[in-house]
Amino acid sequence: MNLKQIAKDTAKTLQSYLTYQALKTVLAQLGETNPPLELWLNNFSAGKVQNGEAYLEQLFQAKPDLALRIMTVREHIAAEVAEFLPEMLLTGIQQGNMEQRRQHLERMTFIDTSDPSPQSEQQTSSDFNSEQ
């Protein structure tokens, strides 16, 4: 397990996600101030935001001012969430793991009482008869 590579991959994924969030913010702003540009950006961005850096590179070629705006918003979002992110991530994973384990344990220990099998009924009645 290469923890350094995992951290790099996680950071890259997070960068792309923050690029997506910045795009949503800029689209909302443009929706209020410049609807035709919002429509253009929305159409341009369709299916391209999975890799945030490649998306920004393409956007720079088409409309540098929008690329700069999205980068600025992305950086602001990153600065705002960076303080809380490590603790929230660890807590979220721990809670998720605990919930998954709980559900697994419930599935393992679930007894179906709606359709008792004839074998268990025979066992119960034979136990009862041997006690008398």
Image (cartoon, helix red, strand yellow):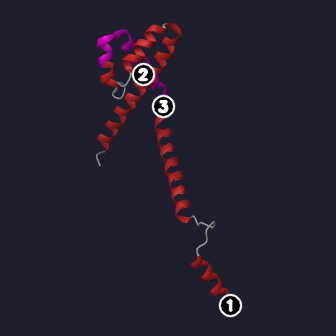
Amino acid found under the numbered disc labelled 2: Arg
Q: Position of residue 114 (x, y in %)?
A: 63, 66
Q: Is residue 61 magenta?
A: yes
**Number of residues whose C-alpha sits closer than 10 Å to that of mark 1, classed few (under 14), some (14–19) or many (20 or more):** few
**Mark 3, residue position:** 83
Check the picture and name the quadrant holding the C terminus: bottom right
Depth order, front residue of 113/33: 113
Q: Which amino acid does the dot numbered 3 rest on? A: Glu
How far across and how far down the image is residue 124, in percent? 64, 82
- The type of residue carrying mark 1 is Glu
SS class, disc 2: helix
x, y percentage for residue 62?
31, 11
Q: Is residue 40 left or right of residue 94?
A: left
- The residue where tag 1 is placed is 131
**Who's the residue at 33% across and 19% down the image?**
56
Q: Which residues are magenta?
A: 57-81
